[in-house]
């Protein structure tokens, strides 16, 4: 029985991967993001394989799952990505950029400070940050957004209204 399920899953994967990849690419415009979304959809399918194998339209389920993942990702990115520029920090121009620590609240937690440094001072991508932290690219984005929100709140509490 397990071999039949594995064969079914492998055949479904081979059949649907190219279609799903093209769909995800149209949503994202990014090959890397498209692969991630397709991987996430198939991971969900694998975790629900017992019910999916008897589903009346497993290919439709996969496409709907992929579409929902892509829409959720798009919503999250459009509504949560905050730029450090929105903090309205007026950092004077100089030959050597200042240490970002000088411009951020001293009571900002170290893990939040670190992700801000990696993203805005070291210019690391979310993928690189995720690799350093052992989390996904999406996890990196979420942590950055939370760090920026904490930073903004701490600055607002000190009278810097942003």
Image (tube, rainbow, N blue to C red):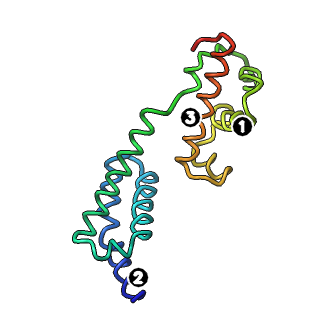
Residue corresponding to mark 3 = 145
Can you tell which mark lies on residue 7? none
As drawn, which residue projects farthest toward the front?
A: 51
Residue depicted at x 65% and y 54%: 134
- The spot of residue 96 in percent (x, y) is 75, 23
* Mark nearer the viewer, 1 or 3: 3
In space, the residues marked 2 and 1 are separated at their CA atoms by 43 Å
The total number of labels drawn is 3
Seen in the picture, residue 81 relative to 96 is either above or below; the reply is: below
Residue corresponding to mark 1 = 114
- Classify residue 55 by image quadrant: bottom left
Seen in the picture, residue 13 relative to 114 is either above or below; the reply is: below
Residue corresponding to mark 2 = 6
In space, the residues marked 1 and 3 are separated at their CA atoms by 13 Å
Q: Secondary structure at mark 2?
A: helix
Residue depicted at x 64% and y 52%: 131
- Classify residue 89 by image quadrant: top right
- Classify residue 120 by image quadrant: top right
Q: Earlier in the sequence, mark 2 or mark 3?
A: 2
In space, the residues marked 2 and 3 are separated at their CA atoms by 39 Å
Residue depicted at x 68% and y 50%: 132
- The spot of residue 53 in percent (x, y) is 32, 76
**Crowding at mark 3 (Cα within 10 Å: few <14, some 14-19, many 20+):** many
Q: Earlier in the sequence, mark 1 or mark 3?
A: 1
**Crowding at mark 2 (Cα within 10 Å: few <14, some 14-19, many 20+):** few
**Crowding at mark 1 (Cα within 10 Å: few <14, some 14-19, many 20+):** some
Q: Secondary structure at mark 1?
A: helix
Q: Quadrant of the N terminus?
A: bottom left
- The spot of residue 113 in percent (x, y) is 71, 33
């Amino acid at each position: 029985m397990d071999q039949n399920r594995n064969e079914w899953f492998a055949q479904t994967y081979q059949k649907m991967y190219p279609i799903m990849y093209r769909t995800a690419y149209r949503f994202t415009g990014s090959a890397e993001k498209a692969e991630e979304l397709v991987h996430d959809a198939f991971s969900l399918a694998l975790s629900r394989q017992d019910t999916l194998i008897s589903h009346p339209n497993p290919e439709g389920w996969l496409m709907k799952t992929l579409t929902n993942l892509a829409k959720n990702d798009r919503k999250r990115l459009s509504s949560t990505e905050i730029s450090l520029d929105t903090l309205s920090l007026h950092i004077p121009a100089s030959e050597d950029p200042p240490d970002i620590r000088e411009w951020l609240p001293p009571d900002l937690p170290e893990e939040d400070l670190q992700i801000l440094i990696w993203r805005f001072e070291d210019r690391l991508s979310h993928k690189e940050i995720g690799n350093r932290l052992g989390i996904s690219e999406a996890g990196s984005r979420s942590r950055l957004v939370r760090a920026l929100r904490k930073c903004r709140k701490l600055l607002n509490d000190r009278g810097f209204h942003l």
